[in-house]
Image (cartoon, rainbow, N blue to C red):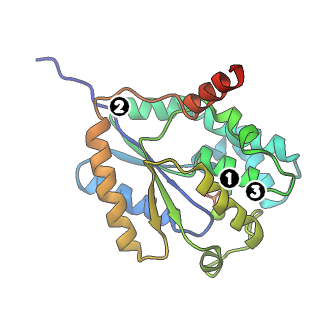
Amino acid sequence: MLSRMTRGAFILLEGGDRTGKSTQCRRLVEYLQGAGVAAQHRRFPGRYRTTTIGKMIDAYLAGSTQLDDRAIHLLFSANRWEAVADMKAALQKGITLVVDRYAYSGVAFSAAKVSGLSLHWCKQPDIGLLRPDLVCWLDMPVDAATQRGAFGQERYERVDLQRRVREYFAQLREPDWLVLDATQSVETVHEAIAQHAVDVIAVCQHQPLREDLWQKEEEDNRVHEQC
Ligand code: NYM
Ligand code: MG
């Protein structure tokens, strides 16, 4: 009998700093594995930090190097592009990827800087990347996030910037995002994410991978410009 290959789902958790993304990613991977679903945790710039690009990002975030805002933006994007082959291979093997941050963080953080990079400019290098099957936005007021442990130690962990990051996430939000009140308990947030994740895993297992992040929007813009 021919067995049909099934693919894993690309589940993304996004949000500002200290909103609980890492905790929720770990909880979700544990839950899925416990339910017999092959699942792995990935994070940006995280796991891909071992690359030359990843190390440049690390040095920048730690404050030990300075870079032009555009240059660091492109490095974050390049760090996603260099991970695509590995992510696709895992998904095609049937492994569900639970990913901590992605291109939405890339755009929201760069656009939030005082240098005023436009949303449009920031999106360009990530157009055509793998598109997540589910985006969970862990949202909470910045004042509550800053009260959580160790806030302020890294570049970008400033209240004014985080407020603008939150506004940009709101602008990037698409209708199918799962928006979560991240001030709720770990368990409450986890249950909502887990329920949606299970549904999405079932729905997308026979669908092709989507390699068209922000592509439709870009094409619509072009048509609009030609009119
Ligand atoms: N960050 C993360 C960006 O500025 N652009 C990106 O593309 C990504 C993926 O890195 N403050 C920022 C957001 C965070 C910082 O991430 C480090 P984390 O998940 O807080 O370690
Ligand atoms: Mg952080």
Looking at the image, is 142 positioned above or below residue 196?
below
In the displayed structure image, the side of residue 200 where residue 72 appears, left or right: right
User: Looking at the image, do the residues carrying marks 1 and 3 touch, with CB atoms under 8 Å apart?
Assistant: yes
71 left or right of 24 in image: right
User: How far is mark 2 from mark 1, CA to CA?
Assistant: 31 Å
The quarter of the picture where the N terminus appears is: top left
Query: As shown in the figure, which amino acid type bears the numbered disc 3?
Result: Ala
Which residue is labeled 2 in the image? 93
- Few, some or many C-alpha atoms within 10 Å of disc 3 (few <14, some 14-19, many ≥20)? many
Q: Disc 2 vs disc 1: Cβ atoms closer than 8 Å?
A: no
Give the answer, above or below, for where 111 lies relative to 187: above
Q: Which of marks 3 and 2 is in front?
A: 3
Label 1 belongs to which residue? Answer: 108
The residue drawn where x is 50% and y is 28% is: 211
Residue closest to the eye, 29 or 191? 191
- The residue at 71%/54% (across/down) is 109
Tag 3 secondary structure: loop
The mark that comes first in sequence, 3 or 2, is 2
Residue indicated by mark 3: 112
| Residue 77, quarter of the rendered image | top right
* Disc 2 residue crowd, few under 14, some 14–19, many 20+, Cα 10 Å: some
Looking at the picture, how far across and down is residue 116, in whole percent? 83, 51
Three-letter code, disc 1: Ala
Q: Name the element at disc 1.
A: helix
Q: How far apart are marks 3 and 2 (CA)?
A: 37 Å
Work out whether 66 lies above or below 219: below
Residue at disc 2, secondary structure: loop
Residue 206 lies, in percent from the top left, at 28, 29
- Ligand 1 has an atom within 8 Å of the beta carbon of the residue at disc 1: yes
- Kind of residue at disc 2: Lys
Instruction: Write the residue at 50% across / 36% down.
Output: 131
